[in-house]
Image (spheres, helix red, strand yellow):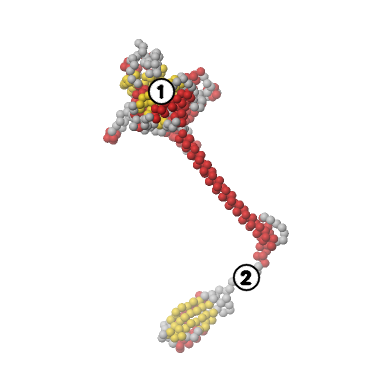
């Protein structure tokens, strides 16, 4: 579905609102502000946009700003980080955009003093006065930051800036646009993207850009290698301005504008304007080291207002003669700016631009905080408040637990003092009391009589050897051992013999057994089947049973 696009036209170096235009689908309406200041114009424009969009489906997907009060110039960057370059532009009050590459080795304060040339530039030093962005890949900033971290850690060497390298930067007076965005946000209208007319020309008319010739999936599979040619798009603004941009696959590489010398609002370029444009391109190509390979001219169909003005065909021919080696195409429209904005609005969904890419949008305006951001901050503040309450309750619980522990510690100290007073009459407290109690413990230990010694160890193994020898002698005669146990306390044994005579003989052998220390006593024998069972108990002499 087609999105609604808004085009803002300004005057007085971008400080005065001239008209607001809504384009998209069948919609094409304009609004001219009455007399008033910038705040009244912004509020009136927001009211008008709200009224128009309230009767139609869809929101405001795109806001395009004219190039009035804007400058695109080259400069030598101090490094690879675009953020550092933007800071340099603001700190120098925009002077680096007028040809001063960097501060001289002399007094830096003198270099950054305002000059009469300041009137040619947007007020980049005043916060909110103008937007500044370097036309560089946003990935360059991340790479530069990564190299800087490696350098700080000692894993790499800082590379000096290439003195021959130049980059393009845009400075655009956008205070009036900021006011309109804020007023739209207050009315609940979100803006999808904010671009300049330079970005719009690059995206809408570059044949290699996002709105160029669309390839079929089978064509993309068959492509082995491809290269893109930089395209120059030139638009004859009916307001009397020649706006141009160099584009590479829809990315803005360089841009500029030339005030036409012809009279009237529908002025056409003259031969001198063509020479100025080519001279400007030559200087850009020298600085960037490349130039466009094709040129596309977007022009209105009005007849030249003066005899010296060139027709669209003549202007294209003159441009092709002066910028040799390129093909020049001329497209004539009744409303070139409206056609450009409408082309973007109708096919905006096909554009997949990387987020925060200065080559595709006005990043600072596109990311301007609005109602959604304030709501996010509100919820974040509420979450932090809830967390603070939870931490307060937890701290109160810890304080209560600490009071309990202090009470327990006080009880322990009181009990310790009671023990101290029970054993020591001298007053003391703290570490001194502990030391004196330890002295009492040591004295008590010295007064305790140490035991005389452990009981003697009985010859258990020798007793086992003597019994094994005797039992081995009677084993072949029919003696059976049921169990035998000898410990440090005593011994016991149960055996089976054939009859009572064998019992008497075995008992006599036990009493006269050599190598035995234990005193063995025999219980009354009992008959167990064909055998006689004997229970024998042993006792060590002289306290072995203790």
Image quadrant where one finds the N terminus: top left
Residue at 56% across / 79% down in the picture?
541
Q: Which residue is identified by label 2?
A: 451
Q: Secondary structure at mark 1?
A: strand
Vertical relation: 512 (above or below) 17: below
Sequence-first disc among 1 and 2: 1
Residue with the most extreme top position? 307
Of residues 307 and 92, the one drawn nearer to the viewer in this rendering: 307
**Crowd rating for badge 1 (residues with CA inside 10 Å; few <14, some 14–19, many 20+):** some
Q: Tell me the residue at 52%/21% (across/down).
A: 114
Task: Name which quarter of the figure residue 352 lies in.
Answer: top left
Between 255 and 541, the one lying in front of the other is 255
Q: Residues within 10 Å of mark 2 (few under 14, many from 20)?
A: few
Instruction: Tell me the tag on residue 31.
Output: 1
Which element type, helix, strand or loop, lies under badge 2?
Answer: loop
Q: Quadrant of residue 331?
A: top left
Q: Which mark is residue 361?
A: none
**Foreground: disc 1 or disc 2:** 1
């Amino acid at each position: 579905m087609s999105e609604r696009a808004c085009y803002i036209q300004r005057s007085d170096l971008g400080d005065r609102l001239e008209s607001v235009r809504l384009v998209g689908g069948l919609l094409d309406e304009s609004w001219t502000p009455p007399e008033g200041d910038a705040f009244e114009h912004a509020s009136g424009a927001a009211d008008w946009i709200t009224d128009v969009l309230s009767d139609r489906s869809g929101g405001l997907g795109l806001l395009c700003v004219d190039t009035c009060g804007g400058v695109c110039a080259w400069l030598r960057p101090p490094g690879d980080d675009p953020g550092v370059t933007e800071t340099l532009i603001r700190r120098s009050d925009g002077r680096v955009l007028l040809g001063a590459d960097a501060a001289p080795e002399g007094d830096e304060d003198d270099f950054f003093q305002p000059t009469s040339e300041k009137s040619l530039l947007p007020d980049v030093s005043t916060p909110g006065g103008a937007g500044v962005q370097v036309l560089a890949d946003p990935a360059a900033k991340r790479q530069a930051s990564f190299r800087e971290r490696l350098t700080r850690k000692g894993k790499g060497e800082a590379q000096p800036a290439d003195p021959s390298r130049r980059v393009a930067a845009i400075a655009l007076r956008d205070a009036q646009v900021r006011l309109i965005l804020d007023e739209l946000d207050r009315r609940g209208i979100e803006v999808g993207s904010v671009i300049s007319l330079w970005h719009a020309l690059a995206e809408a008319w570059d044949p290699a850009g996002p709105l160029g010739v669309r390839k079929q999936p089978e064509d993309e599979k068959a492509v082995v290698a491809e290269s893109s040619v930089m395209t120059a798009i030139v638009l004859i603004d009916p307001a009397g301005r020649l706006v141009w941009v160099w584009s590479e696959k829809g990315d803005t590489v360089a841009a500029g504008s030339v005030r036409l010398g012809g009279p009237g609002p529908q002025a056409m370029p003259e031969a001198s304007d063509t020479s100025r444009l080519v001279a400007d391109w030559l200087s850009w190509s020298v600085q960037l080291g490349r130039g466009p390979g094709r040129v596309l001219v977007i022009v209105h169909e009005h007849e030249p207002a003066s005899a010296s003005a060139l027709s669209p065909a003549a202007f294209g021919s003159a441009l092709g003669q002066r910028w040799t080696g390129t093909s020049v195409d001329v497209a004539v429209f009744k409303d070139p700016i409206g056609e450009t904005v409408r082309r973007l609005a109708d096919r905006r969904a096909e554009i997949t631009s990387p987020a925060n890419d200065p080559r595709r949008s006005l990043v600072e305006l596109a990311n301007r905080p609005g109602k959604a951001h304030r709501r996010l901050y509100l919820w974040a503040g509420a979450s932090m408040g809830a967390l603070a309450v939870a931490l307060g309750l937890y701290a109160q619980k810890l304080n209560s637990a600490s009071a309990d522990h202090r009470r327990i510690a006080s009880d322990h100290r009181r009990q310790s003092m009671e023990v101290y007073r029970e054993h020591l009459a001298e007053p003391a407290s703290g570490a001194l009391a502990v030391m004196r109690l330890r002295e009492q413990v040591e004295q008590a230990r010295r007064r305790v009589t140490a035991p005389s010694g452990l009981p003697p160890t009985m010859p258990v193994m020798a007793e086992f050897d003597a019994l094994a020898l005797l039992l081995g002698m009677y084993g072949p005669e029919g003696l059976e051992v049921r169990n035998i146990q000898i410990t440090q306390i005593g011994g016991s044994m149960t055996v089976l013999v054939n009859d009572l005579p064998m019992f008497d003989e075995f008992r006599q052998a036990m009493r006269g057994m050599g190598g035995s220390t234990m005193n063995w006593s025999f219980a009354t024998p009992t008959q167990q089947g064909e055998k006689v069972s004997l229970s024998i108990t042993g006792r060590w002499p002289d306290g072995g049973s203790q």
